[in-house]
């Protein structure tokens, strides 16, 4: 399921000197298809469980083809009113589907990294503005320090976004055995941050831990954050979609009380790469942090805003269109069924693996992630390597709580019971082969 050609072979196929005479377009496409295939992974497969990578819904894929054919620079409502209307509709549907405040602005970015960046940029603007500092005019030099607090097991893209924004390293708050932030410890950390007087506070929470799939205790964590005057941002790259499933409501309770949210549509929703979603309750903060004003831009003045006011890019493709197509094709019940199916497949696979001798499922499988160990680290690494070499499924290795693990992510809408059976059998055979050496 992984690439079968080396980097050197692929470089030889695609590199070399640029020819003086061009190749006919059809031949170029044929060449790409022929020579790229050995260097690709079977990411669209229902048996691909690596990282957190979803498949692609048919309607979303076809919509993405239209986006390329239309070739619209989706920056201004004046220039591409159809794209603006489609993305605005998709944003409104997402807010209602996920139970987020209807007054929020929604921007379609490349992925969760930039969605986190966008939400945190809006937070920076609002917190410094409320502290009496004009960051647009004066920059960060001499600005009040923003105290950023994060859970011990937040995703690294939170730290990356903070670094991009010049906010430095965050204060780390302990997490429990599943990676959920400890709300009592957060309360104490907030007290310490404000011990010397009022200061801007930013708290980052998580919907869906990378290794366990666990969700932070939003009700308690947001309550103590708000009691300290904090802006609360939620990184929900794949987990935010649990809010669309009524029976998973316990995981996302009170999540809508935060101030900004980030997710990937190409994870649990299954639209093509690339498409992240940034949601910010404070529309003024989002547009002030992201927007650009120039004399040559004919900007929207009816209150809805231009697409460019909600994302970092000025020039971009209409990546919200496949989201609209996915939502239109599924409906709210279909989205719930799809996300419910991902969680059910993960639970079934975890159950099958737990029944195998010598297999440890290390996390509570509440959503779509499974972390597995096979005794000692060396055995776990060997089993993981064997699984990858056999190629029946693809699962990625990682390290969690001081142990090497096989990390399994169920993210593809096509994953079914047969795929789960194949995955469980692949793990069993790999373990038996390692033991037999």
Image (spheres, helix red, strand yellow):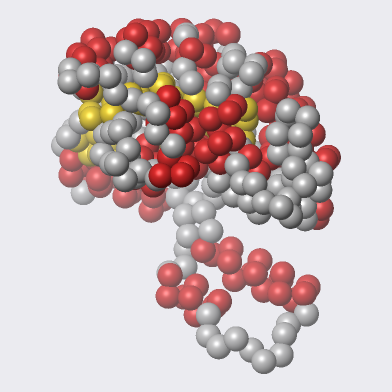
Residue closer to the observer: 135 or 253: 135
Residue 230 horizontal/vertical position (percent): 37, 19
- Residue at (71% x, 71% y) in the render: 30
In this image, 358 relative to 30: left or right? left
Q: Residue 436 appears in which quarter of the rendering?
A: top left
Quick check: 13 left or right of 59? left
Q: Position of residue 411 (x, y in %)?
A: 52, 33
Q: Hey, which residue is sitting farthest bottom in the picture?
A: 20
- Can residue 45 be seen here? no
Quadrant hosting residue 264:
top right
Q: Is residue 124 above or below residue 388?
A: above
Of 44 and 47, the residue lying toward us? 44
Residue 392: tell me if it is visible: yes
- Towards the viewer: 324 or 361: 324
Q: Is residue 305 left or right of residue 121?
A: right
Taking the spot 47% from the left edge, 17% from the top edge, the residue there is 258
| Residue at x-position 28% and y-position 33% | 145
């Amino acid at each position: 399921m992984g690439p079968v050609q080396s980097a050197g072979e692929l470089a030889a196929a695609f590199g070399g000197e640029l020819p003086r005479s061009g190749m006919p377009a059809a031949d170029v496409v044929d060449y790409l298809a022929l020579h790229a295939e050995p260097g690709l992974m079977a990411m669209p497969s229902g048996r691909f469980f690596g990282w957190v990578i979803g498949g692609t819904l048919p309607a979303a894929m076809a919509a993405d083809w239209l986006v390329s054919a239309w070739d619209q620079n989706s920056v201004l409502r004046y220039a591409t009113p159809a794209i603006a209307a489609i993305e605005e509709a998709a944003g409104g549907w997402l807010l209602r589907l996920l139970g987020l405040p209807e007054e929020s602005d929604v921007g379609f970015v490349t992925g969760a990294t930039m969605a986190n960046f966008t939400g945190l940029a809006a937070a920076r603007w609002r917190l410094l503005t409320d502290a009496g500092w004009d960051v647009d005019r004066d920059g960060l030099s001499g600005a009040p320090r923003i105290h950023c607090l994060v859970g011990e097991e937040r995703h690294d893209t939170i730290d990356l976004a903070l670094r991009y924004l010049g906010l430095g390293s965050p204060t780390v708050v302990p997490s429990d055995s599943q990676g959920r932030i400890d709300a009592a410890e957060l309360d104490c950390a907030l007290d310490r941050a404000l011990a010397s007087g009022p200061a801007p506070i930013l708290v980052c929470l998580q919907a869906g831990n990378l290794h366990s799939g666990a969700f932070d205790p939003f009700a308690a964590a947001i309550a103590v954050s708000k009691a300290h005057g904090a802006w609360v941002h939620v990184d929900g790259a794949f987990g935010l979609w649990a809010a669309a499933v009524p029976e998973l409501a316990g995981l996302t309770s009170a999540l809508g009380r935060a101030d900004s949210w980030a997710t990937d549509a190409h994870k649990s929703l299954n639209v093509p790469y690339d498409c992240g979603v940034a949601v910010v309750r404070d529309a003024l903060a989002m547009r002030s942090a992201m927007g650009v004003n120039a004399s040559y831009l004919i900007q929207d003045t009816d209150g809805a805003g231009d697409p460019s006011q909600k994302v970092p890019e000025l020039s971009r493709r209409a990546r919200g269109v496949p989201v609209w197509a996915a939502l239109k094709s599924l409906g709210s019940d279909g989205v719930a069924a799809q996300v419910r199916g991902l969680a059910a497949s993960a639970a079934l696979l975890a159950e099958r693996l737990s029944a195998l001798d010598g297999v440890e499922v290390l996390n509570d499988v509440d959503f779509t992630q499974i972390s597995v160990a096979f005794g000692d680290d060396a055995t776990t690494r060997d089993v993981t390597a064997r699984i990858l070499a056999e190629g029946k499924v693809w699962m990625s290795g990682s390290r969690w709580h001081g142990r090497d693990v096989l990390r399994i992510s169920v993210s593809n809408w096509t994953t079914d019971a047969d795929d789960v059976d194949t995955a469980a059998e692949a793990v069993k055979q790999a373990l038996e082969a390692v033991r037999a050496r």
